[in-house]
Amino acid sequence: MSKAHESPGERLRALWARLSPLPGGKWLFSRLVGFIAPYSGTIGARIEALEPGYCKVTMRDRRAVRQHLHSVHAIALANLGEIASGLAMSAALPRHARGIVTNISIAYMKKARGTLTAECRAELPPDLTVSSEQQYYAPIYDEAGDEVARVTATWKLGPMKK
């Protein structure tokens, strides 16, 4: 199959399968995701695990993602959760479907410091020939395992335009 006929989900899964086992492969895959989605790339997220319907992403605490109170900025956290939900959902999409985020919200539980981890499990609806909205949750944890924030991303899923 030529790359022109692959869906975004197929390309994503193939690229992950090819790069992730290699030394530095997860880093390279993460940089490529950041290149494809430049704004998302600004937080320096690292994809740690990816499979259809599941993604685990980490982000180091560094000056570029902090605010004036010396903790990770609220929007950097929202970005991290959106990346996790988008990759989990995209990796599960079949060839004939696509998705776009239509709403995002975030609840903050405590100041976010240190390396943070966002995880998302995204179960797709059985019929993607009609459009529907799905909510996916991406809790974000600190190194102690405490939940610091929870992102709720609403994705409109449906058929590819012809």
Image: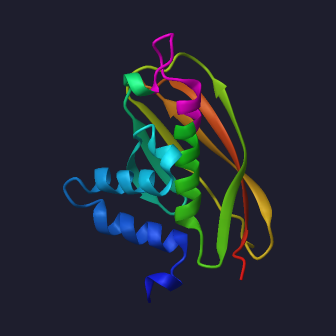
- Residue drawn at (43%, 19%), measured in percent from left and top? 113
Q: Is residue 136 above or below residue 16?
A: above
Indicate the colouring scheme. rainbow
Task: Indicate the position of residue 106 as horizontal and vertical percent values.
Answer: 67, 31
- Residue drawn at (72%, 65%), measured in percent from left and top? 125
Q: Is residue 6 left or right of residue 47?
A: right
Residue 143 at least partly seen: no
- Residue drawn at (65%, 79%), measured in percent from left and top? 96
Question: Which of 49/145 is in front?
Answer: 49
Residue 103 at least partly seen: yes
Is residue 160 shown in magenta? Answer: no
Q: How many marks?
A: 0
Is residue 66 shown in magenta? Answer: yes
Task: Indicate the position of residue 112 as horizontal and vertical percent values.
Answer: 49, 21
Indicate the quadrant containing the C terminus: top left, top right, bottom left or bottom right. bottom right
**In the image, which residues are magenta?**
65-78
**Residue 161, located in which quarter of the rendered image?**
bottom right
Task: Indicate the position of residue 131 as horizontal and vertical percent values.
Answer: 80, 67
**Residue 133, located in which quarter of the rendered image?**
bottom right
Task: Indicate the position of residue 139 as horizontal and vertical percent values.
Answer: 57, 36
- Residue drawn at (67%, 62%), measured in percent from left and top? 99
